[in-house]
Amino acid sequence: MRDVYVDNNATTRVAPEVKEAMLPFFEDLYGNPSSMHHFGAQVEKHLIYAREQVASLLNADSEEIVFTSCGTESDNAAIYGTLASYPEKRHIVTTKVEHNAVLHYCRHLQKNGYRVTELSVDRLGRINLDELQSSLSDDTAIVSIMYANNETGVVFPIEHIGQMVKSRGIVFHTDAVQAGGKIPLNLSALPVDCLSLSGHKLHAPKGVGVLYIRKGTRFSPLLIGGHQEHGRRAGTENVPYIVGIGKACELAHSHIEEERVRIRNLRDRLEIELLKRISKTRVNGDQENRLPNTLNISFESVEGESILLLLSKEGIGASSGSACTSGSLEPSHVLRAMGVPFNAIHGSVRFSLSRYNTEEDISYIIEKVPPVITRLREMSPFWSATS
Amino acid sequence: MWNYSEKLKDHFFNPRNVGIIEKPDGVGEVGSLACGDALKLMIKVNEGGRISDVKFQTFGCGSAIASASALTEMIKGKTLEEVEKITNQDIADYLDGMPQEKMHCSVMGREALEAAIANYRKVDVGKKEEGEIVCQCFGITDKEILRAIKENGLTTVEQVKNYTKAGGGCETCHPKIEALIALAQGEQKQEASIEVPSAKKKLTNIQKMKLVEETLAREIRPALKADGGDIDLIDMDGNRVFVALRGMCSACPSSGFTLEKYVEGKLRELVSEDIVVVEVKS
């Protein structure tokens, strides 16, 4: 048996280079970057360098980079910071398939008097740009639409959306937590005001995130206190983790081409082989516009948690949109918004790859998945009835 | 990852009695594809009224498969009279317990068993207990919910969801479920009212504490949970009730208002007129 981790949209392993870069900050380099003495000064220069590393991945200016504690904080801060800057505007536009860090925050704001439009998606998980256009009004303070979906990997036309939103003078935020490090992001050309990243999705540790805020964008901080991050996020900088996400962004930058070619090929091979070897199987989401590492696939008439438990026994780590794996009893809100039939939602499995996956990993998954599905189908009262 | 017991995992990885009985004496089918779990139980009954063979097929999660497997082991060789007494809690106990969120799997086992016995006796109970559908998403009736509440002593919507799945989808039926909880508790209170003094009479300290706890669980906690919050009873001293707010409530700037107006109001209404609520930070 081997260990095959293919749940990288949930979290990634910390790159060894990232860990190495962080270690001195748990030892000699413990100063507070705000301090006047040399203990602080020698740390501050690493903070500046990390900011440049992140800015470089985004093709942005380092002044536009704010370090946060996680992707959720970045998302919350972007929305809160915009609404607080435009107190007269009471309308938010987002989508039904956002990560809960955006969706549940917007629903929370809705309870407090904001008007929220949740854009629908079609069967392939694509939004309708006409619906977006007609949802915008003079009362709209912010549009928050994810760059790429965490469950299906579907990539939204952010440039097109941004132009539409910006032409109305509305602030545009995109949650790029899944896109960061997987596809090129060029913020010098992209009409985006705020963008969120999360460290642990790109081989930095959990507990650090980034909020990009374009120069000239009105913003009110969520955390108020010290002057850190140019007054946009108070709190002593989490230096080791910031150094970590800086290094991780530098590595991601150098691996973008590998994502585009090698990882995409691995994913495509996995997809083709599973579809070929297992009947009544479908891919969820727009296969044309998708992250190179993500495969969301449904095996009809079997339940996701059972699949995951049996795969885990074989050493394979994946995830599912099934109700029973969600902690609530609710099946994936993303797949439901796409109108995926219940039979397919419950049997959905997401494989999300990283640069640490190999051809051997994929061969192993291709070998292990079909017997698991067969075993569960033979046990299922629906399978004998339908086949 | 769910915290499954070793025994539950064993029944999932090595399920007993999976398959089909060609000419079963009784068949029970419960659940549906939409629900995300379903169980078909087939039994053979011999002349002595004993279950001589049992097989099952299931579509569902780890605990659904394990519950079905456990049930078959529990009923094999037993008389119908014996197995009729099996409750969902018995199934959960057999598996050394199961996560609260998964208790509906054990309920499904008990329902399939009842359906199979009824089918054997040629009693036409239909697929559902009669009653009004409360949860449209999963097709759960008021009778089923009431039964789960009473059998398992459920006090919150969250628990009802865990045991019956009702309310796990669109959530619009939550007020109805709350009403059913209140109804069940009202009935229980009536049954018990012969010995227990009514709420407004002079209460002993233990009675008062119990009533405060009940009121928190039944009336207050579900309302706070709807907003992502929660409340814990920390202590009581005479008429002063010390509570701590959790989750969203603890960070909510209007929590002082929440406490004073809402919690105190409810406790005064349902427990005692002179209750004073004190929030403690912990």
Image (tube, rainbow, N blue to C red):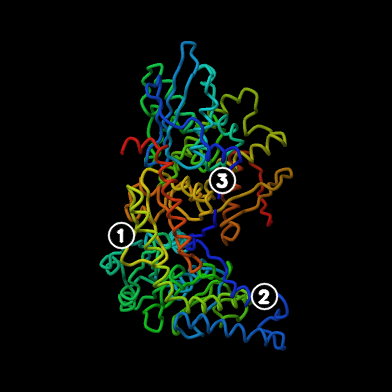
Q: Residue furthest top?
A: B47
Label 1–label 2 contact, CB within 8 A = no
Residue B199 image offset from top left, x and y in percent: 62, 33
Mark whose residue sits in front, 3 or 2? 2
For image coordinates 47% across by 37% down, the residue present is B164
Q: Amino acid at mark 1?
A: Leu
| Mark 3 Cα-neighbour bin, 10 Å: few <14, some 14–19, many ≥20 | many
- Quadrant holding the C terminus of chain A: top left
Q: Nearer the viewer, residue A254 or A99?
A: A254
- Residue B220's place in the image compared with B153, above or below, is below
- Do the dots labelled 3 and 1 sit on one chain? no
Residue A179 image offset from top left, x and y in percent: 43, 70
| Mark 2 Cα-neighbour bin, 10 Å: few <14, some 14–19, many ≥20 | some
Chain where mark 3 sits: B
Sequence-wise first label, 1 or 2: 2
Residue placed under numbered mark 2 in the picture? A23
For image coordinates 51% across by 55% down, the residue present is A317
**Where, by quadrant of the figure, is residue B125 drawn?**
top left
Residue A298 image offset from top left, x and y in percent: 37, 51
Residue placed under numbered mark 3 in the picture? B220
Question: Which element type, helix, strand or loop, lies under badge 3?
Answer: helix
Q: CA distance from mark 3 to mark 2?
A: 48 Å
| Mark 1 Cα-neighbour bin, 10 Å: few <14, some 14–19, many ≥20 | some
Q: Is residue A135 left or right of residue B29?
A: left
Mark whose residue sits in front, 1 or 2? 2
Question: Which element type, helix, strand or loop, lies under badge 2?
Answer: helix
Residue placed under numbered mark 1 in the picture? A124
Q: CA distance from mark 1 to mark 2?
A: 44 Å
Residue B281 image offset from top left, x and y in percent: 68, 57
Question: Which element type, helix, strand or loop, lies under badge 1?
Answer: loop
Q: Nearer the viewer, residue B226 or A94?
A: A94
Chain where mark 1 sits: A
